[in-house]
Image (tube, helix red, strand yellow):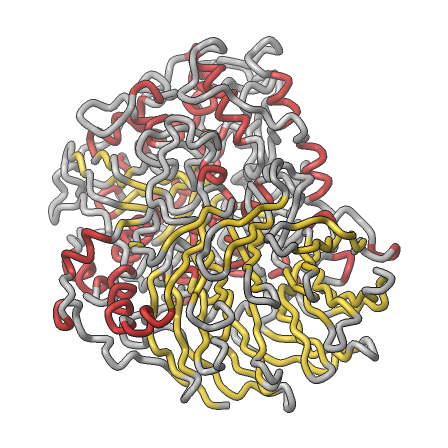
Amino acid sequence: MRIGRSALSFAFLSLAAIGVSVWAYQAQSTQLVTGKFISPAGTQTDVGSFPANMVLSPDGRFVVVTNTGFREQLSVLDAKTGALISKYPEKGQGSRNNSFYYGLVFNGSTLYASRGSLDKVDSYSLSDAGTLTTVASIDDKPPEGRRGRVPNFPAGLALSEDGKSLYVVNNQTHQGNDFKGSLDIFDLATSTRIKSIPVGGFPLAVAAANGKAYVSNERDGNVSVVDPAKGTVLSTITTGDNPTSMTLDSKKETLFVSNSGSDIISVIDTHSDKVTHSILLRSGDLLRVAGATPQGLVLTPDGKRLFVAMGDLNAVAIVNLDGYRLEGYIPAGWYPTSVAVGQDGSTLLVANAKGVQTRNPNGKDVNGLGQYGPNIIEGTVSRLDVPTALRDLKQSTLVVLNNNLAANHTEEANRAAFVHPAIEHVIYVIKENRTYDQFFGDLPKANGDASLCLFPREVTPNQHALAERFGTLDNFYVCAEVSADGWNWSTSGMASAYTERNVFYNYSGRGRAYDFEGTNNGVAVELKGMKDVATAPNGYIWDQCARQKVSYRNYGWFVTFEDGDKKEAASKKALQNHTNGDFRHFDMAYADSDAWLKHGLKAMPGQLAEFNGFPSRFSAWRKDFDGFVAKGEMPKFQMLRLPKDHTTGTTPGLGSPRACVADNDYAVGQLVDAVSHSPFWKNTVICVVEDDAQAGFDHVDSHRAPALIISAYNERGKLDSRFYNTDSMLRTMELLLGMKPLNSYDAVASPIALFSKNAVNSEPYDSILPLKEIIGDVNESTAYRAADSARLISRFTEESLPDIELNDILWGAIKGAKTPRPTTPHTRWKSFDRDDREEKTKE
């Protein structure tokens, strides 16, 4: 196998060197909340939420786009102009009964589309005018022996070479099918299943060549070679990490496979079924760490070039197949997933899963789509002229490198400029779901909107005091939209292609399992010797600690549990023997702090009074910490989950939203109090973030969130309005502990610049106990939407479509049911039921 480690020959040129001003370019580009910039080329067409795949019609006139987000539809575009011709269905794209997924394939003028959790593949007739009409439906439910609550989840589709059969990849992988996916073969004449063939884990795409079917197995890092006639797997071809999309050359002699986790294209000879070339799609000199994420790919009609959608580079890579070398990049929108080329090769269409808007404020209704972050982000398709793109490739490549903060060696510059105080320990605290305006909208002098503040100083006295003393960050953004990708961004610095593609499908209530915090379909698969399909390239921050011999201790991150368990168990191998089993998991009926005891209150009717003898998460951590003090040594890195600010809305018998957030606030205060009164104070930094900002409104962006960095070395009372994000927090901690970056995001993230060389802020912090009437406030059955809260919001799960509802519930409970919302009238998802969701996500 020939391996090409691509390094662009002009990689070290500056934009100025070729006549393009870096500053002029930066003025034209805009910065995403992820820290990278986009300067999308071409014209844009809106196509709904998270476009995930595209296919060109056989006559070359149309391109059809499918989605995996909140608003799912089939969009028909003019292949030459990129203009929207029609969409199917016309209405109801947000209904969970309207579900599409990745698979698209044409058979003449008939289009087949996979329907995901609906367990079917539907066919549509494409008219000469570019409209779709339903023709038939193929039932793809699991065979009787494997039926359970987890669907087959049809994904990739392909036609057999004789056109008589349809190959359907079943994406789900769980205990009921021995943790394998399957390839089903359907007779198109009768719409009946002929065979069901087990393949690898979480298979996504399928291609047919030389009497064989090829299936990419996203979990296993390989491609299954299937004999459809015999119904057997002939061989398994090892590729790179997380193979996703595939395409064949016109003679079906060569198969190209995108490896989203390792940033390479595997080139497979379909006669020998061997990998002949491996093409690295990162510029080797400047993009030196993982995180480019190749996905959809397409060959030009002449077969000379391969275009590849590079999700985390926000670009399209061009591979010259004369020598199998990376030729350059074209800038795209936010997170491109798929590409298509017109029949004459002159037009390139690029699906941008998160569109081209770099800021999505949700302080008011957005184009009739409401205010919920994942719903208001509109995906687009870019239309570009191929000859122009090839002519300007040198310039556009440098634009992409600059967009990814690579061309000027940002990583080295940030490391050199970082003020490194005498720090030996970092405590990393992750909380749940609040926006900046919800917490700090009332802070004077900072960029807040007090009208959107739900948890002002009287509810969060500690976080207000800590921000004012140790530094207010009013331009800090979480990189994720919800908890599912939030926990991956917060712990890995990015999210995998699997996570990005499936998060919104899960959150829209369509039945996808919550696979994003160490379990797949509820099983801690790493502990069974399998890869966790959701793991981002290069793993998690604790993996980096283990690799670099940095001691670490875990409190509540990535743990498995069942109601009634007495000990928490880590779902990741690297967290075993590093996890405190007495620190309770995500449970909204358990206290973060000791505030309720300090006020002499009894446990609320629905509250768990203790867990293994500990009345709060803080008290379980405090026992460990007191032991560290007694020994005079402490782990270099500690990870704490303090989730109570998520709240359960107005669920009767549990704490009110203000009580939950005040409890969480006091836990943060108690933690800082304990550390600042200890011998570790002058060599410890405490970092506090929200995993996401989905459950609230913000006038700047739906991703803007409160964040704190606390140490004796912080400049006092600083308002820092420079751009920071989740990866800035990770990079700050990595630099403090002497650790290498994980990927292309934290490598170039700006570390948070609040430190001085000297301990100028060293006096201990005394925690502030919130008022008794706030801490002891219990939801009554008459509270605003109490019955909806009890029905929709789970005590044990942070993932949920109900966060759309929770925004309204929190507003009504705190501001008053009749207080005008900062939006148009609220639309409820009345069809959604928590119990139904939980049934669908458990086997």
User: At 65% across and 42% down in the image, what residue appears?
Assistant: 510
Residue 264: percent from left, percent from top: 46, 75
Residue 702: percent from left, percent from top: 39, 36
Count every numbered label the image shows and give the total: 0
User: At 32% across and 76% down in the image, what residue appears?
Assistant: 284
Residue 200 vertical placement versus 762 (above, below)? below
User: At 60% across and 35% down in the image, what residue appears?
Assistant: 796
Left or right of 10, for residue 730 = right
Left or right of 800, for residue 522 = right
Foreground pick, 665 / 51: 51
Residue 673: percent from left, percent from top: 31, 31
Q: Is residue 744 at least partly visible in the picture?
A: yes
Foreground pick, 112 / 838: 112
Left or right of 485, for residue 545 = left
Q: Is residue 570 at least partly visible in the picture?
A: no
Residue 754 vertical placement versus 411 (above, below)? above
User: At 56% across and 47% down in the image, what residue appears?
Assistant: 86
Residue 454: percent from left, percent from top: 39, 20
Residue 791 vertical placement versus 700 (above, below)? above
When asked about the image quadrant of residue 441, the answer is top left
Left or right of 645, for residue 391 = left
